[in-house]
Amino acid sequence: MRGLILSGGAGTRLRPITHTSAKQLVPVANKPVLFYGLEAMREAGITEVGLVVGDTRPEIEAAVGDGSRFGLQVTYIPQSAPLGLAHAVLIAEEFLGDSPFVMYLGDNLLKEGITPFVRRFAESAPDALILLQKVADPREYGIAELADGAVKRLVEKPAKPKSDLALVGVYLFTPAVFASVKAIKPSARGELEITDAIQHMIERGLRVEPHIVTGWWKDTGKLEDMLEANRLILGTIERDVRGDVVDSVLEGAVMVAAGSRLERCTVRGPVIIGADCTITDSFIGPYTAISDGVVVEHAEIENSIILDESRISHLNVRMADSLIGKHCVIARSDSRPVAYRFMVGDSSQIGVL
């Protein structure tokens, strides 16, 4: 079995972070989202992986390389434009050949990984295995309608959903899917939809098996989902303090990488702090992930993600529910006249008290 990971999306819902970084490389608990998918492939025994890439290929290739650090052989498959999930399957046909394969969306996270689903696919031998989970707003997803436990119909982002079972971003196929991706036409939004391809397989009389996921699943394309994924993963960490801790209190599951220094701080886990950080006279609250080289002084932070080399300084109120990009500065100024002073990029959001 081979793997196919899709990493070509533009990440418009995570702007401005994705103006300068591929959305699949935005970290959750200090690890790029894409790396979780690569590790899941290896854990499932899959070693040959095709990575579908778009405009952010140089950045993704720099991060992943040839895949050997993950125990994988990675082949890069360029996609000229984000023309749909089924289009990604189409352009990967030469790489996939006659092997069954797992298709994994590179900005998704699954608590269970993919090992149990790969095992079930091998045992049950359907033409396709789709993963489903109940969602609050089915209009935002591809939706499956079931009848007597079988897949009856698939609809992409229906205006009036007849089901609340969304397609999770992991699919398992035999090569039979290629005939269907070649047979369908682009949707109204100009994409070859994987839901249409799977529906075509059903109409061909092929066996499409559903499986309802019981563990958590997160599409990290939006800020609130990114923060929720961060909370879920941080909830699994164990205490591991390797940096210097001076006159500070660490409560619960706290990870501090080597080279970091905490002075006169209270850290209430679960929290992860990367390497070479300097944190002084501050409170770091639960579900916060701080990447390498960050400086925090006289500030309070919780339920947030702070990326590399940023500085948070002298804030009068607690910062919460935030995603801060690389090399950012958020600081209180004593200069006169007293005023808010911002330098803000496109698509930014700022909440002011």
Image: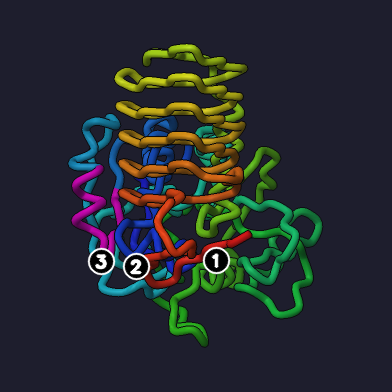
**333, above or below 282, in the image:** below
Q: What element carries label 1?
A: helix
Q: Is mark 2 on a helix, strand or loop?
A: helix
- Residue depicted at x 42% and y 28%: 279
Which tag, 3 or 1, sits closer to the chain's start? Answer: 3
Residue 95 placement, left or right of 128: left
Depth order, front residue of 169/221:
221
Res 30 visible? no
Which tag, 3 or 2, sits closer to the chain's start? Answer: 3
Q: What element carries label 3?
A: loop
Q: Kindly identify which residue carries mark 1.
A: 198
Which tag, 1 or 2, sits closer to the chain's start? Answer: 2
Circle 1: residue type:
Ile
- Cβ–Cβ below 8 Å for labels 1 and 2? no
Picture quadrant of residue 67: top left
Q: Kindly identify which residue carries mark 2.
A: 90
> In this picture, which residue range is highlighted in magenta?
50-63
Picture quadrant of residue 94: bottom left
Picture quadrant of residue 10: bottom left
Farthest residue to the bottom: give it: 188
Q: How far apart are marks 3 and 1 (CA)?
A: 27 Å
Residue 212 lies, in percent from the top left, at 69, 47
Q: Kindly identify which residue carries mark 3.
A: 55
Q: Residues within 10 Å of mark 3 (few under 14, many from 20)?
A: some
Depth order, front residue of 17/23:
17
- Residue depicted at x 46% and y 71%: 180
